[in-house]
Amino acid sequence: MRRLALLSTLACFLVGTLSLGAVCLRVKSRIVPSFAGVKTDSIRGAFHVHSKTSHDSKLSIDQIAIAARQADIDFVILTDHNVSPAPPVIQRGVLFLKFTEWSTAFGHVIQLAGSPLAKADKNSLEVLNTIHNNNGLAIIAHPFDMKRPWVGPWEGLVGLEIANSASALRQLLRDNLFRIVPMLAGFFIHQDLTWGQLYAPNTRALKRWQSEAQSLPIGMCGVDLHGWIETKKNLNLWNLILPGPLPEQIDDQAKYVLEKITHGSFYCSSAQNNQPIQMRTEIIDAQGQPLLYNSTTLPESPQALNIYLQNKNAETLRIVLYRNGQRLMTQPGPTLSYQRPGPGIYRVEIETDYPKLLEGHYRATLAYSNLLKIASPPKTNNQDPTE
């Protein structure tokens, strides 16, 4: 009996080893897409980054700065837990904006700019309005996270995370625990493929974003970095892409970044291997002139809405145009032109078929525009006043 048990154990060990070896070989053989682009004056930033000032992070600002330089990141938005905002700094040529992720009674909210919350404010149903009254911008962090969802009121928000890397990883493993083995294998032998599994759209966050669309909240994509995986790769899981270049002075740089974010004049993009999706959104106005969208100037009766991709292999990407939350038009890259767009709230997603860990592909969304509102033309009263 003892010999039989030993043989059974040995057989199980051999089968397990062979199975794990087969998984590793299969993961290693998978080919991830490449989307190298051309040189532009856009600037790239990472949002929702924690330094060792937070209780759950182990990285110094200098360590983050070194990785940011390697990742071609121009600015980093620090969101350390429950610490007061601090003036911006430049470390190794990288701009650091120091803001706060508050732990409230209703979930986590990131405050950009403004005066810090008082302790009692964090337990108040008016927490978002208080941030607004303090001249800050309230961004709901990971609103549908399985560990720390937002359960409070939404009135007063300026934006929300429509994508969060840590949340996506938790959700991925929760949906299918059998992914743990190939994920672990990929972590050691094919990290690009492993982290490429995190781009399934967060449909609940996107629906909530759309439900608040009349106030044009900004859609943010956070890396939620704590230093537990390779910092360079973590920083490039999501980038905020802003029109450049940055001003020269640090205070002007901080003001510029915050202004572009506030107005929704940016888009979110995956940037694996330092290869962000290079997307340009152009509106042709009623006079035939191109203009770059800014949420403070809402165009009326435009002739066209044009999307351009400047990446190599752009034909393997799909440009998806949404209007009022509904999928309106899909076009393979590199361009999409929608003629005579009527009034409504538009947004753009860039998607592709991304390889799964072992076999098949899934629909991965690699870039999100912000909300684009096309206003209704002013009503005219042609009625005879004598009638």
Image (cartoon, rainbow, N blue to C red):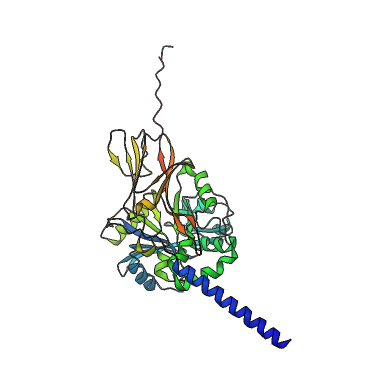
Q: Judge from the rendering whether residue 307 lies leftward or rightward of residue 126; answer left or right.
A: left
- Place of residue 53 in the rendered image (x, y in percent of width and height, measured from the top left): 46, 71
- The residue under the point 48% across, 56% down is 163
Residue 364 x, y percent position in the rendering: 46, 55
| Residue 52 shows in this picture | no
17 or 94: which is nearer to us?
17
- 312 above or below 291? below
Q: Is residue 286 above or below residue 103?
A: above
User: Going 27% across and 60% down the picture, which residue do you hit?
Assistant: 249
The residue lying toward the viewer, choosing from 271 and 93, is: 271
| 144 with respect to 235 (left or right) | right
Q: For the point 70% across and 87% down, which residue is it?
A: 3
Q: Quadrant of the N terminus?
A: bottom right
Is residue 145 toward the left or the right of residue 223 in the image? right
x, y percent for residue 200: 50, 56
Residue at x 41% of width, y 40% of height? 373
User: Which quarter of the picture shows residue 196?
Assistant: bottom left
Q: Quarter-wise, where is residue 94 in the image?
A: bottom left
Nearest to the observer: residue 172 or residue 290:
172
